[in-house]
């Protein structure tokens, strides 16, 4: 009887070990990206991380960017572009490092070699659910790393973004502050257990006042900080999938979009609205991973549009 129990126990342990190894090697469970709280920024991806999720490589550098290691100050022969954004710029677990918008731009700009620079760096300072105020706080903390151009990549929802908060860190399953002891534990926590609510978030999410105006003011400050270092500023906004086609954006989004357009004209900001471009695409649904995030095809199109504007800005800068 004891021998049977030992055999059964050995089989169970062996199966658990096999499942654990499979979850780690095939899906990357057990090694999620972790976050750190920040009083001004709200939260950051912890620096110096590497992992794979569902086969996609993810690297976070010493400045919490989804980029490889960098020097604080680039060489004179380097074209450096800084992208500030949320999960669309970051790419999340569903995007391999090579397929992020920043990496696609770096590859294309390097291959085109249309500038007077021998090297190209496109830095990616981003995190899930950041809004203009998070991105402003990041820029205030770290500066723009001597980038010739700063690109702020937002989506329609960011016009209504709430203030930075660290409340989700370590309490929301999507913002862990430590590694789980086992891959099996992460799977259970992420997919089988119900997410516990964070009551304090209600006050943050119900921020009163003109939220669109507050976020436009944050964008204005980002522009001002960019100009202080003689860098150029480019604003890009991607649409939600439901905004494409009929009936299009909702009334409150149309109002906010018009405010943004008027704002960019007043502030003389170079602005790319991706919505009409996606609307002219034959199958825009094929550009999306979900209702808001782009897949590789979407990232490639956005990167080309941004690159085109960058080349125009840099060409004008050289001529002037």
Image: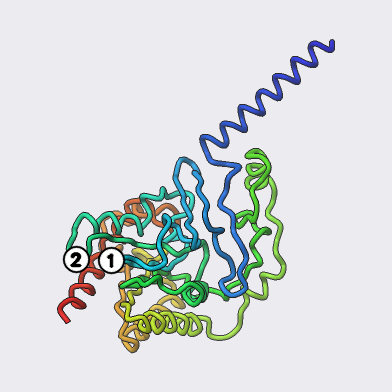
Residue located farthest toward the left when viewing the structure as drawn: 319
Report if residue 242 is visible in the image: no
Identify which residue, 66 or 134, lies in the foreground: 66
Please state the total of marks drawn on the protein image: 2
Report if residue 177 is visible in the image: yes
Identify which residue, 48 or 295, lies in the foreground: 48
Residue located farthest toward the bottom when viewing the structure as drawn: 266
Under tag 1, what secondary structure?
strand
Q: Quadrant of residue 149?
A: bottom left
Residue 84 appears left or right of 208 = left
Q: Which mark is residue 115?
A: 2
Residue displayed at 42% across by 52% down? 289
Residue 47 appears left or right of 291 = right
* Callout 2 touching callout 1 (CB < 8 Å): yes
Q: How far apart in space, not on screen, are marks 2 and 1 (Cα)?
A: 8 Å
Residue located farthest toward the right when viewing the structure as drawn: 1
Q: Quadrant of residue 240?
A: bottom left
Q: Name the residue under label 1.
A: 79
Under tag 2, what secondary structure?
loop
Identify which residue, 290 or 120, lies in the foreground: 120
Density class for disc 2 (Cα within 10 Å; few <14, some 14-19, many ≥20) is some
Residue displayed at 25% across by 69% down? 310
């Amino acid at each position: 009887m004891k021998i049977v129990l030992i055999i059964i126990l050995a089989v169970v342990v062996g199966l658990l070990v096999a499942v654990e190894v499979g979850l780690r090697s095939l899906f990357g469970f057990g090694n999620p990206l972790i976050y750190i709280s920040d009083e001004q920024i709200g939260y950051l991806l912890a620096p110096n991380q590497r992992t794979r999720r569902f086969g996609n490589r993810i690297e976070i550098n010493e400045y919490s960017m989804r980029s490889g290691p960098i020097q604080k100050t680039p060489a004179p022969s380097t074209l450096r572009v800084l992208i500030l954004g949320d999960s669309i710029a970051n790419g999340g677990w569903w995007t391999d490092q090579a397929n992020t918008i920043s990496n696609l731009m770096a590859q294309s700009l390097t291959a085109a070699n249309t500038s007077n620079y021998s090297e190209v760096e496109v830095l990616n300072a981003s995190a899930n659910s950041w809004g203009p105020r998070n991105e402003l706080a990041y820029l205030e903390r770290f500066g723009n790393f001597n980038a010739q151009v700063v690109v702020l990549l937002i989506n329609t929802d960011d016009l209504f973004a709430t203030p930075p908060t660290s409340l989700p860190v370590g309490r929301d399953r999507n913002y862990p502050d430590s590694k789980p002891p086992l891959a099996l534990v992460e799977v259970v926590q992420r997919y089988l257990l119900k997410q516990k609510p964070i009551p304090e978030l209600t006050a943050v999410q119900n921020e009163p006042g003109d939220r669109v105006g507050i976020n436009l003011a944050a964008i204005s400050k980002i522009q001002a900080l960019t100009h202080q270092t003689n860098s150029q500023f480019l604003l890009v906004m991607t649409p939600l999938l439901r905004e494409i086609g009929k009936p299009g954006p909702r009334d409150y989004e149309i109002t906010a979009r018009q405010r943004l357009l008027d704002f960019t004209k007043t502030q003389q900001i170079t602005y790319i609205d991706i919505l009409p471009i996606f609307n002219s695409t034959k199958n825009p649904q094929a550009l999306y991973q979900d209702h808001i995030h782009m897949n590789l095809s979407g990232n490639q199109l956005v990167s080309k549009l941004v690159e085109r504007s960058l080349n125009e800005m840099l060409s004008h800068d050289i001529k002037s």
